[in-house]
Image (tube, helix red, strand yellow):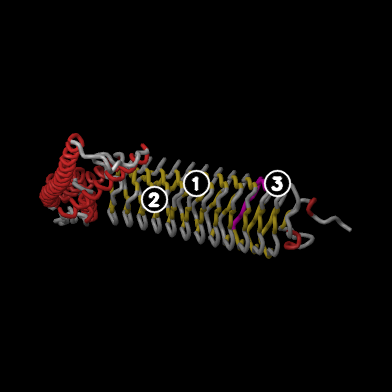
Amino acid sequence: MTVSRKPRSLPDDQKLRLWGVGWALALTFAAAVLAAGGTLYGLVVLLDFQKIDTTAKLDAKTLFDLVKLSFGVVAGAGALVALVVAYRRQRVDEAGAHREATRLHTERFSQAVDKLGSDSPAVRLGGVHALAGLADDAPDDSLRQTCIDVLCAYLQLPFTPDPGTDPAHQEEHHRYLAFRKVRHTILRLIGDHYRRPKGTHRSWQGCDLDLTDVTIDGGMNFRGAEFSEGTVSFIGTTFSDGNVYFHGAMFSGGNVSFGGATFSDGNVSFDDATFSDGNVHFNGATFSDGNVSFDDVTFSGSNVSFDDATFSGSDVFFDSATFSGSNVHFNGATFSDGNVHFNGATFSDGTVSFGSATFSDGTVSFDDATFCGSDVSFSSATFSGGIVSFHGAEFSDGNVSFGSATFPGGVLSFDLATFCGSDVSFSSATFSGGAVYFEGATFSDGALAFEGATFSGGTMYFDGATFSDGALAFRNATFSGGALSFLDATGPAPQGLLAAVGTPPPARVALPAAWLPSAP
């Protein structure tokens, strides 16, 4: 197996560019004359010299001064010529040194790549360390990037999977473990170099990192790594078994993609990571089995997308995460089995969207989360099973929309939630099964609207809810089935509720006596 990559050509901005000697000297003299003339004129004006007496005779002292001035001008001109020649010589020497460094780099590069293609795992390990050292000592960023690209390309090469520990395949098993050691060494070196402060020796921050379609088995440690600027790709990457750490990593100002990645078995941790500015994509990613943790993560001013991701049979945690001024999307995502937790998370400003997402089985929890000034959307989402809980959540300012959402089953709970100054809408939503709970919830300011909603099944509970100020509206809602309970609710009757359910209300609709019209 041979990896063949040639170093990139020298960038145009590093090629030697010099004007002709004639042009260089002419421009230098012109600049010197202008500078001297400007200085003399400034001094004359500043010191307010009187007009020169043209009738004065030329004496010996004045003649001697003029001779000295002439020699000074000639000496200055010679110094300018020497300066231009010295500068050109230095530039030529620098270019020659760069060419020599590039030549040596190319020779070492070829030797390191040859080692990567060796049949011996030990030799390959030597090639890996040689390439990492070359990246550290590269004469320019382009050559450094080439070395990183080759290391990434090695990880992308197909490899023979583990044949198992059967004694009949012992040799193949040992060979697999040896070559996996090479792969893990590359990942370790990448993590080490991305932890070093940007601009320091051996730091690879700002370089592109392409781990597309790589299989990472047995763990990886990018703890504390910093990915700034550049492009980082984990597209189609498979994270299986072992522990993968991005704990405390920083993703700032670049593009990071986990699109189509698979997280299966094992544990993946992004705890305390920071995503600021830039774009982070988990589009189409699959989270199955194992645990993926984003606890205490900070998303600040970034675009984070989990569109069309699948959460199946795994536990995913965003507990105490902070979403500040970011746009976070789970549009079209599928939540089946497993558990996804946003407990205690804070959503401020920005947008959070679960548009057209599907919730079936499993649990999605926003318990005690805070939504302050952000727009949260579950528009056209489908709740067909499992539990989606906002128990004790606080909604202040901003908007929360379940418009056109469908509830054929499952449980949606807002028990003990607080709605203060925010608008919550279930407009045109369809409730045909399952249960929705607002028990003990508090509604102050803002509005809760079920305008145009259809209730044909299922149950909705507002037992013990408190309505003060604000508005709860059921205008144009349709009740043809299911049950609706406001037992022990306090506050004014919701607008349009009696018109929707009829007077007197049917047995499946329980209302406080204070909301019912008095008998004639």
Q: Which residue is pictured at 31% across the width and 39% down the height?
A: 197
Q: Is residue 432 left or right of residue 295?
A: right
Marks 2 and 3, the one that precedes in the sequence: 2
Q: Residue 458: x and y, percent?
A: 62, 59
The residue pinned by badge 2 equals: 289
Q: Which residue is pictured at 51% across the width and 61% down the height?
A: 356
Which segment is the magenta one?
434-443
Was residue 437 drawn as part of the magenta stretch in this picture?
yes
Q: What number is the disc on residue 466?
A: 3
Residue 208 in sight here: yes
Q: Residues within 10 Å of mark 1 (few under 14, many from 20)?
A: many
Looking at the picture, which amino acid does disc 3 mark? Answer: Thr
Give the Cα separation between the discs numbered 3 and 1: 30 Å
Q: Residues within 10 Å of mark 3 (few under 14, many from 20)?
A: many
Foreground residue, 433 or 255? Answer: 255
Q: Which residue is pictured at 13% across the width and 53% down the height?
A: 117
Q: Which element is circle 2 on?
A: loop
The residue pinned by badge 1 equals: 324
Q: Residue 456: x and y, percent?
A: 64, 64
The residue furthest top is 61
